[in-house]
Image (cartoon, rainbow, N blue to C red):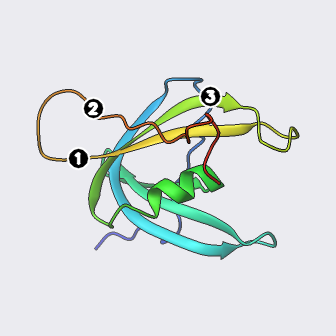
Amino acid sequence: MGWSKVGSGEIMDLKKDGKGTETVGTYLGRQENIGKFGTVLHHIEVDGKRKSVWGSAVLNNQLDQVAPETKIKIVYLGQQASQNGKNPMNMFDVFEDDGKEGEDVVEDSKTEEGKIPF
């Protein structure tokens, strides 16, 4: 009998390879209130291995709409200035597998004024 350590898995940095980086896997769910800042940790199976991604307002908002066991693709879009002018925000698009072959459907998540809606 073999044993595998239980844990959150390898922590992935979705930004490390720069703008346009894509991560494809199966969304497994999330853990909330991690650490002293109450951060969210999302779990994804990538290439048969459990990996984890630290949440952010942008990423959490999109992954909240994805059911566990759904195949997803996360695309890093780069940084965008925040509304308060302080730290820039890391932007992501999240796609879920619709079972159809072809182009990805991209809906603009900005309001009419071109600002993020939160």
Circle 2 — which element? loop
Q: Residues within 10 Å of mark 1 (few under 14, many from 20)?
A: few
Q: Residues within 10 Å of mark 2 (few under 14, many from 20)?
A: few
Q: Is residue 51 above or below residue 87?
A: below
**Is residue 38 visible to us here?**
yes
Q: Which mark is residue 97?
A: 1
Q: Is residue 36 left or right of residue 117?
A: right
Circle 1 — which element? loop
Residue type at mark 1 is Asp
Q: Quadrant of the N terminus?
A: bottom left
- Write down the residue under mark 3: 78
Q: Residue at x 84, y 40 (%)?
A: 87
- In this view, the residue farthest toward the right is 86
Based on the displayed image, in which of its 4 quarters is residue 36 positioned?
bottom right
Q: Are marks 1 and 3 in contact (CB under 8 Å)?
A: no
Q: Mark 1 to mark 3: distance in Å? A: 23 Å
**In this orientation, which residue lies closer to the viewer: 53 or 113?**
113
Q: Which mark is residue 104?
A: 2
Q: Are marks 2 and 1 in contact (CB under 8 Å)?
A: no
